[in-house]
Image (spheres, rainbow, N blue to C red):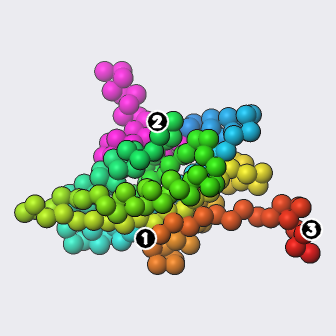
Amino acid sequence: MLRRIEYASTHDGLTQLKNRREIEKLLGQEIKRAQRYDKPLSVMMLDIDHFKLVNDRHGHQVGDEALRVVARTIKQEVRNTDFVVRYGGEEILVIATETSIEDSKTLAQRLHAAVGRAPIPLKNEETLRVTVSIGVASFSVTQNTMQALIKSADEALYRAKESGRDRVCYSEPPPTAFDRRAAA
């Protein structure tokens, strides 16, 4: 009984992903690990495109199933050492441990493609497919707090949505002092 209560307090009931309350703990631990061991860390914010239309056209049960299918698909594509969290609504956050910006680009493209292929069952054996927009950010000297990392991923996500959805965009870290001198 105690394990069920603990699970319910740390997981989303619909998708069975970790819930938003767990982000602070998980991402905080991973940022400390990245700093201590000089390891890369990336975060991806995913948003199901036109999710309101899915609910409006097919009903909330199909919308719920779309969330479950997307969550399951993402979980299958990431490593056991990564974390997948339901951030809110139709947004999912992936914490990719020991993952460089280059590797996170590959992972984000793989997640994007896998979600696009995943069938969501409808009535009469028909299926629906959804797409996602993804924003990717990596731990850096300037993006070294949980808030900064999530904000960067969220800003990249909104660039993806504003530029047509169904795509992956990456955060552009501010130039370092060395980069600014070279540009001058």
Horizontal and vertical percent for residue 116?
A: 34, 63
Q: Which of disc 2 and disc 3 is earlier in sequence?
A: 2
Disc 3: which residue: 181
- Residue 53 relative to residue 166: left or right: left
Mark 1 and mark 2 residues within 8 Å of each other at the beta carbon? no
Q: Quadrant of residue 62?
A: bottom left
Q: Which badge, 1 or 3, comes first in the chain's sequence?
A: 1
Q: Dot 2: few (<14), some (14–19), or many (≥20) neighbours within 10 Å?
A: few
User: Distance of mark 1 from mark 2, alpha carbons?
Assistant: 26 Å
Range of the magenta residues? 1-24
Residue 126 appears at what percent x and percent y? 13, 64
Is 179 drawn above or below residue 150 in the view shown?
A: below
Q: Residue furthest left?
A: 124
Please state, as top left, top right, bottom left or bottom right, where the N terminus lies in the image.
top left
Element type where label 2 sits in the image: loop
Question: Horizontally, is 142 left or right of 63 in the view?
Answer: right
Q: Which residue is mark 1?
A: 166
The 10 Å Cα crowd at callout 1, few under 14, some 14 to 19, many 20 or more, is some
Examine the image and state in which quarter residue 179 appears.
Answer: bottom right
The answer, for residue 8, to whether it is visible in the render is: yes
* Residue 105 image label: none
Residue type at mark 2: give it. Answer: Asn
Distance, label 3 to label 2, CA atoms, is 41 Å
> What amino acid type is highlighted by mark number 3?
Arg
Element on which disc 1 rests? loop
Look at mark 2 in the image and give the residue it sits on: 80
Residue 93 percent coordinates (x, y):
49, 51
Q: Nearer the viewer, residue 117 or 47?
A: 117
Q: Amino acid under label 1?
A: Asp
